Amino acid sequence: MNATHLTYIDWLIMLVYFAFVLGIGFALKRYMRTSNDFFLAGRSIPAWVCGLAFISANLGAQEVIGMGASGAKYGIVTSHFYWIGAIPAMCFVGIFMMPFYYGSKARSVPEFLRMRFDEKTRAVNAFSFAIMTILSSGISMYAMALLIQTLGLFKGILPDAMIFHVSIVLSALIVLGYIFLGGLTSAIYNEVLQFFLIVAGFLPLVWIGLRNVGGWQGIKQTLPPSFTHSWRGMEHASTNNLGVEWVGLTMGLGFVLSFGYWCTNFLVVQRAMAADSEESARKVPLIATIPKMFFPFLVILPGLIAVSMGSHMAGASGAAGTPASVAAAASQPATAVTDADRPHGIVPVKTDPITGAPVVDASGQPVYNYDLTVPVMLLRFFPTGILGLGLTALLASFMSGMAGNVTAFNTVWTYDIYQAYINRKGSDAHYLWMGRMATVGGVALSVAAAYAVTSFNNIMDALQLVFALVNAPLFATFLLGMFWKRTTGHGAFCGLTIGTAGAFIHHGLTLPVGDAVGIHGGWIHVVHQYPSDMAQNFWTAIFAFAINFVITVVVSLCTKPRPEPELVGLVYSLTPRPVETHLEWYQKPSTLAVAVLGVAVVLNLIFA
Amino acid sequence: MGLDIRIPLGMIFLIIGGIMAIFGLATHGDAALYARSLDVDINLAWGAIMVFFGAIMLFVGKRKKWQDTAADPRPWEKGDATTKAPH
């Protein structure tokens, strides 16, 4: 890929962004008087601000780059990660779970687990979460530095060998600067800024891109129907691009993984806990669903546009959507589709970073670098000036991903590890100081993680796998803890640990078709083969959830439950419902949730 | 918390949008530059939209009173003289 040629206007726009990011940190520094200000933003942020931060913290590199890549590779079926894999869970956490998180006055999700269950359950969650946030932040940092290097942004300004290192150090210093100064408030404010910049950077890209390919109708006429319909062929794993059938999709992604992430991950829940009232906290995830629902048009559509350009698939034009073409597409097993068989439009071929030669697979076919879909689109359609805005949007997405993880880490470290196990009797000023030190430590460890990713082959795949396996059973613990008063601390602990072990064992016994034994599974013994990686991931999650659920119930029934008065405010049946009598019907969170779910159903039907 | 987010948000959109719009005006009619964006002066058009959005944000942010100031006691500090912040 040729080096990107930026002019002074592009650099100026990027500099303005970085000046504001750090300026917000400086402006908020004087408000950081207590540890509550630093870690919880003083619980004084309006719902709409927290709502935008709620999705922006999740709008990291994996989303902007990854969803664009997935759109290019699999098509509009990627929208399942939003309309099935996010919206229902976000509604659920707002309506049912937020009253417990916010009302219990817990300062973090692990602390909620201690209040509901016991110390050991909190410890498992706190330590695993702290490690994962650091690794996630490191991966974001690594991905950003790699992208800057690939695009050649600093080419001619810095020696080639230095570009990666300078990118890592600069991003680390900026994130460190604004969180160290303004804590969670600074992160939330910057996430709001980043949200609007990402929208401002990507909206014109989609508009120009659609004009170029003749709009949605043009895409439909160019690409095969499997790229423009999200539910076609979902009755069987072999008849759709994802290689997973509807049960695995709705139960694995739509229930276990999505509820496990949106309802229990402190990274996002922390944003809602910063709201100025319980009513606001309940509205935070619901407000977040509104832009979230339309994000596929911003991040997936560029991928579809990219593969539409210059591609013309047999059977697409004219026959698109006809029963014959669907049947023809359906007769192709998903596992038989290689990159070379897919439309690839302007997606570049992967090249060897040292020799610059195109990378080919075992059959001699070129391997396409789908992760470069969105950057290539920016370079293709944006002239200098707006190109600076587009690159700012891209950098903003990496920054928000990193900062979200670092703020979640400093809180969990200070409250759930340092205060719980190292120094219980420190003053508030001491914990505020520790929070700032944890920010420094968190960023330093993220840099180390970024270099670890650089140094070891496949470590990125391994880390993503571990995240998935550790997260998979989590939701069962929270679901039972909040909605079944009989659940005990021993039950939760056993369920969580055995559920996680079950996830690893399931992974070790299964393998996606076409993959080698090892990191992709089958490392114990292959007893079952899934049609795709995704099917394996979803079913691993379903097994882990089920094991956790059953073990928690069985152990809870064999152990002594806590007295009911201790569980008021922590369990649904023992907690008074939130008072909503002062709200008009249209102001109630449940009304908003029903409306949002209705729109999600309509979107699914439109693109079915 | 003291600072209304709409003010920096409005300012950054005004500045970045302003830079793009001025650059768009200066390069208006440069066919080679805007061939990428299908002959649309995207800098001028999108820059103007960003300036408009930024101006609205700044206007609303300046008019509306942000609910909290640095000197206000935090919700948990209210009614507790021992932990009240010094004014």
Image: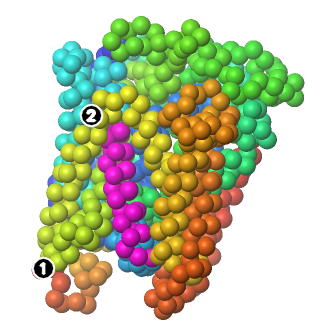
For the residues tagged 1 and 2, is the chain the same? Answer: no
A29 w.r.t. A279: above or below: above
- Which residue is pictured at 18% across the width and 17% down the height? A159
Locate residue A99 relative to residue A190 in the image: left or right.
right
- A495 up-or-down from A74: above or below: below
Q: CA distance from mark 1 to mark 2?
A: 47 Å
Question: Which dot marks residue B87?
Answer: 1
Disc count in the image? 2
Which quadrant, please, contains the C terminus of chain A? top right
Chain letter, disc 2 residue: A
The part of the image, by quadrant, that contains residue A147 is top left
Q: Of A243 and A316, which appears nearest the observer?
A: A243
Image coords of residue A429 (percent x, y): 14, 71
- Does B27 sit above or below residue A168? above
Q: Residue at x 48, y 21 (%)?
A: A369
- For mark 1, does the 10 Å Cα neighbourhood hold few (<14), some (14 to 19), or many (20 or more) residues? few
Is A407 positioned to the left or the right of B33 in the image?
left
Quarter of the image where one finds residue A1 = top left
Magenta-colored span: A117-141
Q: Nearer the viewer, mark 1 or mark 2?
A: 2
Q: Position of residue A85 (x, y in %)?
A: 60, 50
The chain to which mark 1 is attached is B
The amino acid sitting under disc 1 is His
Is A193 colored magenta in this rendering?
no
- Spot the residue most to the front: A525
- Front one among A99 and A14: A99
Residue bearing the label numbered 2: A451
